[in-house]
Image (cartoon, rainbow, N blue to C red):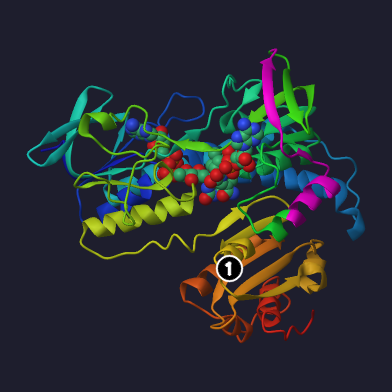
């Protein structure tokens, strides 16, 4: 029957759409139900948070603002003067929207190509019939499927008593769609969104204040990297990042917003043109009717899954931001592929210990594996090799010679346990470390591999040599 499927995927983000394509490739009759809409809200748009209001649009704006900053501050040392640049912010947003549209419509094309049936709407569990799961779509249409993959993603964590109107008080959606440069911008939360969005508007000329609750900066990162990043963002780039802040009140006046906060026991109120709230994200199970079938969630609202993304119910799987683990697009996609292959009887494996993290600021930051702090608290003996971009010919040629690569290796076995980078294009360089760690490489393996000259990757090579106290250029 037309409304019976082998696999139904709920959610068309990087977890769901990839799971659907892989399931169809494996020969399953597959449907993907997604509620996402385009920016205007008048047409379906696949791709979830990542493509519509996350990874892709943020990187487009980071690039535009980086160009603007480069022309203003970095060309003169090359002997180039281009006058005072101007920026048409609406045009910048239009370019970003074009990239988003291209990629979201690309998924619709991929669905057709792979014979994934695509349904636009909100899916809700409606029970079971003859061993098949029933799903209602928009409360009207009912479909049945042998397997269901839940990939409903995440939504911004709300700040109590603060209403996001996406005009003056913004979440990620509003932050990515401003058509004028706010003179004074406040960000609550110095996490990944805070740093990336703060960088965009700082480069375009906003006076940026970041209010962070925790007393230490970027606690998820290696502390040496976090210390270096804090210095660059505050001292060199002028971001005003305040740590250990308690937000007392937020008053949206329409034209501006007053934020009252306490630091070091002192309360103050500042007025900003815009406020971005980025204090993390929470799993999204709204409207799914998980209670109807008894789908288990943990106390934080994440759907409970085992290492293989199995839920407590037979043939219901969950992947991506709606389950444990880092909220990253590449993690969601890999889980999607793995679940489709498990349904087909294969034995894939997603290694949650080797997932790269990247922050697309300037300098970029990237890491994989354990931090020094984690190794110390686990009592693992390690050696550290570090090399900087300061003496790297390619980095100097690029005019981006700040930062370092740090490699942590097991003291006895020499196995690479973690790699932490801050510097130019480390978003790309981190892949070498990921591949090495997936192949259980040692520091010596990297030290003996030929790295092209002059390239940024030579800094990884040097870090590996340094971990054996035989750096050639350090
Ligand atoms: P989502 O992408 O959230 O997709 C879920 C989809 O399910 C949505 O389309 C939603 O409409 C749909 N849905 C929900 N409920 C239902 C329902 N009941 N019925 C039908 N459809 C439903 N990650 C990175 O790896 N790199 C980055 O650079 C990066 N940048 C980011 C920047 C920002 C500003 C933000 C907010 C996030 C960023 N992320 C980044 C995180 C990344 O976007 C998420 O990890 C990723 O989108 C999670 O994928 P997902 O498939 O689990 O969920
Ligand atoms: P985050 O978890 O990265 O950071 C949130 C920050 O807000 C934390 O530092 C936290 O201590 C702080 N905070 C929490 N409550 C607060 C309060 N009441 N007052 C002040 N500060 C408070 O979350 P963020 O930045 O919202 O991003 C959400 C997720 O999206 C990230 O965890 C990441 O997984 C993903 N993302 C990934 C990107 C990438 O890979 N480059 C880019 C942007 C987002």
Between 82 and 35, the residue placed more toward the observer is 35
Dot 1 crowding, Cα within 10 Å, few <14, some 14–19, many 20+: many
Is residue 376 left or right of 157 when viewed as pictured? right
The residue under the point 31% across, 48% down is 20
Q: Is residue 366 above or below residue 55?
A: below
Quarter residue 106 falls in: top left
Quadrant holding ligand 2? top right
Residue 449, how many percent across, how many down? 60, 84
Coordinates of residue 446 in the picture (x, y in percent): 60, 81
Question: Along the line of sight, which residue is nearer the eye, 353 or 154?
Answer: 353
- The answer to which of 272 and 55 lies nearer the viewer is 272
Magenta-colored span: 227-253
Is residue 298 visible from the viewing direction of this image? yes
Q: Residue at x 20, y 26 (%)?
A: 141
Q: Residue at x 83, y 42 (%)?
A: 238
Q: Give residue 144's quadrant in the image.
A: top left
Label 1 secondary element: strand
Reply above or below: 351 against 103. Answer: below
Q: Residue furthest top?
A: 253
* Residue 206 coordinates in the image, percent (x, y): 79, 33
Instruction: Pick the quarter of the image with the C terminus.
Output: bottom right
Residue 251 belongs to the span the image colors magenta: yes
Question: Extreme left residue here?
Answer: 130
> Residue 408 at what x, y percent from top left?
62, 72
Label 1, on which residue? 418
Total tally of numbered discs in the picture: 1
The reply to whether residue 101 is visible in this rendering is no
Residue occupying the point 65% across, 62% down: 426
């Amino acid at each position: 029957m037309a409304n019976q499927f082998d696999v139904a995927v709920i959610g068309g983000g990087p977890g769901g759409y990839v799971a659907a394509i892989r399931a169809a490739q494996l020969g399953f009759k597959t449907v993907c139900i997604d509620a996402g809409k385009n920016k205007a809200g008048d047409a379906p748009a696949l791709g979830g948070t990542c493509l519509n209001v996350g990874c892709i649009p943020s990187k487009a704006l980071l690039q535009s603002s980086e160009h603007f900053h480069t022309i203003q501050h970095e060309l003169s040392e090359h002997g180039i003067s281009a006058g005072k640049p101007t920026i048409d912010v609406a045009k910048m947003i239009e370019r970003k929207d074009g990239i988003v549209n291209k990629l979201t419509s690309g998924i619709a094309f991929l669905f057709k190509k792979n014979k994934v049936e695509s349904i636009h709407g909100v899916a809700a569990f409606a029970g079971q019939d003859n061993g098949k799961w029933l799903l209602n779509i928009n409360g009207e249409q009912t479909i049945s499927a042998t397997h269901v993959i839940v990939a409903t993603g995440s939504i911004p964590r709300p700040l109590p008593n603060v209403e996001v109107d996406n005009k003056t008080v913004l979440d990620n959606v509003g932050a990515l769609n401003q058509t004028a440069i706010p003179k004074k911008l406040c960000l609550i939360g110095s996490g990944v969104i805070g740093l990336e969005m703060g960088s965009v508007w700082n480069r375009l000329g906003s006076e940026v204040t970041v209010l962070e609750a925790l007393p230490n900066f970027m606690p998820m990162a290696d502390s040496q990297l976090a210390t270096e990043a804090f210095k660059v963002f505050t001292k060199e780039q002028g971001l005003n990042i305040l740590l250990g802040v308690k937000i007392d009140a937020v008053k949206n006046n329409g034209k501006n917003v007053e934020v009252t906060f306490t630091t070091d026991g002192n309360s103050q109120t500042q007025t900003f043109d815009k406020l971005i709230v980025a204090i993390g994200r929470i799993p999204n199970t709204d409207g799914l009717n998980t209670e109807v079938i008894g789908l288990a969630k943990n106390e934080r609202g994440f759907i409970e899954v085992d290492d293989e993304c199995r839920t407590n119910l037979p043939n219901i799987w969950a992947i991506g931001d709606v389950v444990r683990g880092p909220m990253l697009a590449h993690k969601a996609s890999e889980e999607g592929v793995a679940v489709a292959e498990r349904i087909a009887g294969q034995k894939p494996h997603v290694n949650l210990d080797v997932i790269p993290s990247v922050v697309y600021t300037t300098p970029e930051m990237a890491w994989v594996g354990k931090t020094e702090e984690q190794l110390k608290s686990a009592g693992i003996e390690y050696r550290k090799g570090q090399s900087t971009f300061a003496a790297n010919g390619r980095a100097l040629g690029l005019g981006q010679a700040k930062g370092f690569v740090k490699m942590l290796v097991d003291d006895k076995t020499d196995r690479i346990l973690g790699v932490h980078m801050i510097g130019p294009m480390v978003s790309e360089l981190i892949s070498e470390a990921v591949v090495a760690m997936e192949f259980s490489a040692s520091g010596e393996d990297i030290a003996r591999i030929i790295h092209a000259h002059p390239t940024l990757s030579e800094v990884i090579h040097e870090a590996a040599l340094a971990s054996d106290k035989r750096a050639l250029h350090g």
